[in-house]
Image (cartoon, rainbow, N blue to C red):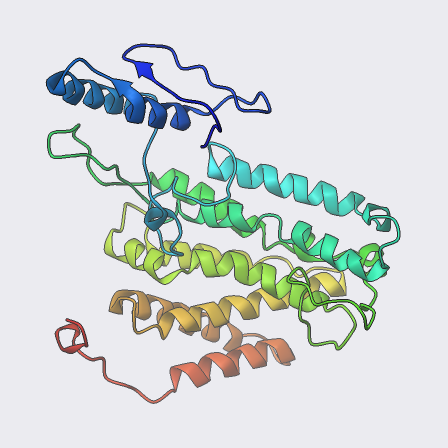
Amino acid sequence: RAYPGRRVKIMANDRLDLRDAYGVGIGQWDEFIVRYAYTTFADRQSASKGLARLIDDAHNQGLIYMSDADARPAGAAHPLANLWDNGSDPIAELRHVMKVRRLVLQKLSAGDLLPGRPLADFEIVLVPIYLYHRYQVAATAKQIGGFDYRYFTSAGQDHTVEPVAVERQQQALDELLKTLHPDELVIRQRLLRLLVPKPFSSLDDRERFEGQTAMIFDPSLAAQVAAELTLSQILQPQRAARLAAYPQTSWGLRHVLDRTVSFVWKQPVAKDERAREVQRIVQRVLVQQLITLAGDSTTSESVRTTATAVLRDIAAERSQEAAPRSDHSLAVLDTIRRFLNRPHTPAQPRSQRSGN
């Protein structure tokens, strides 16, 4: 951080007490960086030992260095390297974020618009709240197939690459699946009545859904986007490959996929028609995500085989439904069969691929 007009010189063991122009204190990581950059020592040997001691102190305080490369990729493995998440525990924070989201959606009204703004702008207010959990979903998903690792020099502390505990991975998956429940995805009629078409003079805004219902708000697309948000994280190809390559006792890729399919397909059918439609949307999204995973040539053969087996299981269950089957079940069955019956393309050996 920059502190205009302020020169910093810190002697070893001096206490650091900086305040910015707003009186807000700096964080632990900020303090460590300033200490490391500006602490002065008597000689080179003292500096080498002193800087090493600062790093050890930082590690002992639980300060872990992770770069953007550890946090930005969708398939990143470290359970704590995230962007724009909150809280010290991603799973607990997702639970909290969903509670906040639920409360705000209950209280949201046209009165939350600035005076004089067109009612059409209500969608711009709603969408960020409806997707309020998106960053915390990404953070929580990193517990699944996640690995704890640190950056040390060869002379540093011993630390091995360790998978996230199975119990924690299970908790993360359970919290993620809860975000797919119709109670979370159905937009109440009270809010739908406020989502009027935007005037011709209104500019396009990224905080709008581009639906398939012309100028009328598309609640089905909103549910689809939210479902894709969660399921694309659970079934992320690199995450799935780690689960397949490093199976743990009673936990691996098949366990994750079976648990997800069970939640999505075996919940009691909702009584409300809009909730039933959301259930169908989530089921279709799951099938499409499984097809994407099963057909992804960039992931491992084990992942593709497992995802294909799960698709066959879903198709078999739909085939065994008592007649007459619903249009939804028939459509899902047709979709899976088209994928399973696709022309076979032999995989190219990795040693023959470009760049290897």
**Residue 138 vs residue 130: left or right?**
left
As drawn, the residue found furthest toward the bottom would be: 343
Q: Where does residue 99 sit, x and y in percent of width and height?
A: 65, 39
Whether residue 256 is visible? yes
On-image quarter of the C terminus? bottom left
Relative to the observer, which residue lies in front, 44 or 322? 44
When asked about the image quadrant of residue 199, the answer is: bottom right
The answer to which of 145 and 209 lies nearer the viewer is: 209
The quadrant of the image that shows the N terminus is top left
What residue is drawn where x is 35% and y is 56%? 239
Q: Is residue 231 above or below residue 110?
A: below
In the displayed structure image, the side of residue 246 where residue 199 appears, left or right: right
Q: How many numbered badges does the structure rendering display?
A: 0
x 84%, y 55%: residue? 117
Residue 8 x/y as whole percent? 38, 20
Question: Would residue 58 be seen by someone viewing this image from the given angle?
Answer: no
The quarter holding residue 311 reads bottom left
Residue drawn at the location 67% of the way across and 70% of the way down: 210
Q: Is residue 36 left or right of residue 129?
A: left
Looking at the picture, how far across and down is residue 314, in whole percent? 47, 70
Farthest residue to the right: give it.
Answer: 116
Asked if residue 211 is positioned above or below residue 122 in the image, the reply reads: below
> Of 320 and 159, which appears nearest the observer?
159
Q: Is residue 353 above or below residue 185?
A: below
